[in-house]
Amino acid sequence: MTQEIRDFTLEIYDTIADPLTWTGVLDQLVERIGAQGSIIFEWSQGDGDMSLSAPFHSGFYTSSALNTYLVKCQHLEARDQEILREKTRSHDEIELLDDTLLAPSVKELKSQEHVKKLMRLGIFHRAAGILNKDNPWISLFSVQLASNREPLDEVERIYLAQLLPHIAKALDLSIPMRQLQERYQGVLSAIDCLNIGVCVLDRRGMIVARNQEFQRQQETYRTFRVSPDGKLTITDRLGQKILESLMSDLHQHGKFGARPRKESIVSHLLEPLCIELSPLRKSGEIGTKAFDGFILCSTDTGLPVSCNTRLVQQAFGLTSAETSLVDAIGQGLTNPEIADRRGRSVATVNAQTKSILLKSNCSNRTQFVRAMMRFGASFLSTDSDSRKPTKPKRMI
């Protein structure tokens, strides 16, 4: 990893604490590969229909112009993106595919309605990739190229391949922070409004700030230990080893491509905590100086989770019987409890749960619940409206 890639990667992870900095990150990426623009697409459920949005984009586009394009061409984008999903469904890697696979010839590609609109903006070739294969309707990366140049070359693809796994992870971990940012001006100053645990650590692993949910998890479970000098550790030996690896080596981040959830630390099978770590070099809420620490997010998957089960079924190819278990698993019920409520044998529920884990590429229920949370779950506490965001906690 060159120093340029390392510095850029750290900027990418800073977007978790400062979601508004995504435009600057995408602008840098566009400039580096000589592209015209870049967009992160996302589908969301509303009134029974799926709607396409572009929550993040480079500065070449205005939000109003993008919204106009999406309203007119959503059905064509949906068709193109479904082709991408089908072509890359079977593996974790992030694969950038050119628009040449969207039509049998360049002539036919240029005849498509949305391509004509892009060409009027001086854009022709595009390349895109799915950044989250747990939920393939979010975090679709697209880069657009000027009409006077060829598709991406090998050097540009190698460059993007080094960065896209980190972009995927940052987008995944920033989902709760985006919900905060949409409601409040700050992120770190409002972390008590989240129902996931958040702990800010300095470069040595010393606790700098933590929210109420993280403190509750500390008191409830035996997963975390804090030394007298304030250093956070994980009591499980393997979990601590993974944590130390993530804190010491930037190469250890983004190793799971379009399934960043696999990088989570599940410290103990008897405890439902799912722990994730990302670098934090700087944040406007911390100050202008380099911080060079970390954000640790800990999700208690034993708490009830509500999500869009229909999308979960589509994403993982679940049967109707398996889908009927998703809500129960999200409510934290054990297999015997599910069997009792549904009037089925425990053996039947065990078999269905095993099938769900296999289809979702999860090794246990904790990982599956973590994957479920990317299908419309709210990360804001039910009483968050009554919790007034405070000034950022003092950084030591």
Image (cartoon, grey):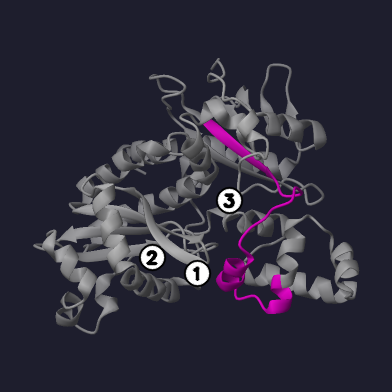
Q: Circle 3: is it few (<14), some (14-19), or many (20+) Cα within 10 Å?
A: many
Name the secondary structure under disc 3.
Answer: helix
Find the distance from the CA under tag 2 to the CA under tag 1.
Answer: 9 Å
Circle 2/circle 3 CB separation < 8 Å: no
Residue 72 covered by magenta stretch: no
Provide the residue span drawn in magenta. 294-323
Q: Do the residues labelled 1 and 3 touch (CB within 8 Å)?
A: no
- Give x and y (percent) for residue 310: 60, 69
Q: Which part of the image, by quadrant, shows the N terminus?
A: top left
**Is residue 267 at all visible to an observer of this figure?**
yes
Q: Quadrant of residue 277?
A: top right
Q: Classify residue 59 as left or right of residue 188.
A: left
Q: Residue 263 carries which label?
A: 3
Is residue 123 toward the left or the right of residue 344 in the image?
left
Query: Which residue is at a point 47% across and 21% down the rendered structure image?
Result: 286
**Residue 91, labelled with which disc?**
1
Name the residue carrying label 2.
Answer: 95
Q: Residues within 10 Å of mark 1 (few under 14, many from 20)?
A: few
